[in-house]
Every structure is written in structure tokens, then in C-alpha cells.
Amino acid sequence: MLASALLGAREPRLPVADLVAAASLFGVSAGAARTCLWRMVANGELTTDNATYALTGHLLERRRRVDEVAHVDLGAPGRWAGTWELAVVAADRRDAIDRVELRKAAAALHLAEIRAGVWTRPDNLDPDRLPASRAVIDEQCVQFQGAASSLTADTARSLFLVDVWSNDARRLIVAMDDELDVVPAGSHLSGALTYQFSLSIAVVRHLQLDPLLPAALLPEAWPARTLRNTYRRFEAAFQRQLSRAGHEPSLKRRT
């Protein structure tokens, strides 16, 4: 929960008071939250300075993934020329750790496994994105850029689980709209904040799973933009609720 608060904040650092306030939404005491923060520092997940905690290590890399899906512009003219990028595992034998690390890196870079050891996606994203994940791919794979492909739009949608992502996105949109229609008060406010914080985390995680395909490969009424726009309104309302509850307003998340 503390990591999620930092992953979604406008900057990848927050004062300890804000993190303790976020923990209180889930009934976590200030002492327990501070203990957890120090453990995360010891594990190399956070750094601390002047009563402020900041992401580092693999959590900072994950934050960059959040930023990427939040700000990527797939509508820019000429962004996709119809070509694909391809990464093919080069080593005959790899240990389990290498295989897991490659799968994580491929997911972060929005690559799909078309067959065992062969990862691909449309060549429409910045090739230098997420350098730590790219380094894993570089180490284990032979790569190709600007490759021609005979994959049809339907095959690409199936490969990237477009229908599954779309259905889940629409459910999240409905959930946020339902919260926007209700203004809780009194004893209901704390429970609403807890649920809304959890819903916010779920939306951010789902945005990270957006396949970021070019428009030519997407079905009509693709809900990604609606999801992001609804999330902006939802987060603004959530911040107002936090203020009413007496929490600091700096736990703002980004879209």
C-alpha cells in the first residue's frame, strides 16, 4: 500500500506524514507504517532524507512504467509505419532467474510472446524506453527493429489480449463513475476513502497493462482514453474527499 501511494503520487517522493496518513486509511498504525518504511529502505526500495521517502531500485523502474502509460501519445501522425520490433532469445540454456527476469522486462516493454522465446510488438513506442528493462532484453536476446509482419489486426488483438483488457477497463470506468455519483459523509467517509484508494491503485495497475497498440490494430470504441479521462475526474474527487477528512492533499496521483 505504501509503495502504491508513492507509485501514484505526482512525484516519486512523499513526506512521512502523508504516507502515514495513507496507511491510516487501512487501519495501519503510525508506528507500523514507519517500521514498514524503514524496512523498505533496508531492502533498497526507498531512500529517505529530511522526513521524506523516495522510490528507488525496482520500484522506481515500475514508476517509470506508470509514467510511460500515463503520457504516451499513440495518436501522433506517422507514429507507426506498420513495422514490428522483435526479440528472440539467443541462449540455448538459461536458468530460472534469467527466464523470470526476461518475462518481467518483456511485460514492462509491452512485448507479447508469440511463441516460446520470441517476443514482439508493433514498432510504435520509443525504442529507448525503460533502459533497465531494455538491458535485460539486450543481454538475453537478438533484436530486430522495423521488421515486416504478416500478422493481421485480429491476430494482434488476440496476441495482446485486447478484449480482456477492454472488458476490465470498462468495469473500472463504471466503478469510478459510481463513486463520482455519490458524496459520502460522516461515518461513511472513511470507508469510502479506503475503497477509492484501492480503486485508484487498480486503475493505475490496469493502465500499466495497456498494450499501447497503434490505432490501426485496435477495435472501435477502445476505452483507454475514456479510462484515463474518467480517472482524472475520479482522482480530483478523491482529493476533495481527502481534504474533507483532514488528510494532506499531496497524495495526488497522476494520469
Image: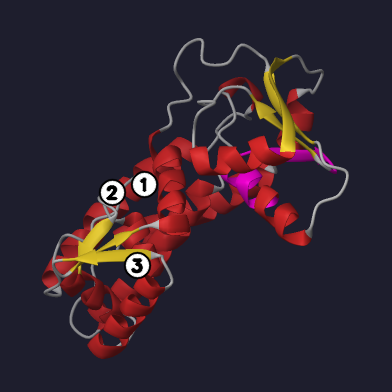
Marks 3 and 2: in contact by CB < 8 Å? no
Amino acid at pointer 1: Thr
| Observer able to see residue 49 | yes
Classify residue 251 by image quadrant: bottom left
Residue found at the very far right of the displayed protein: 92
What is the C-alpha distance between the residues marked 2 and 3? 14 Å
Q: Where is residue 94 drawn, in percent x and y?
A: 81, 52
Amino acid at pointer 3: Phe
- Specify the label residue 230 is tagged with: 1
Above or below 200: residue 161: above
Identify the magenta region.
103-116
Q: Pick whichever, 56 or 5, lies toward us.
A: 56
Q: Residue visible at 24% across and 66% down? A: 48
> Which residue is under mark 2?
233
Q: In which quarter of the image is the N terminus?
A: bottom left
Sequence-wise, the earlier of marks 2 and 3 is 3
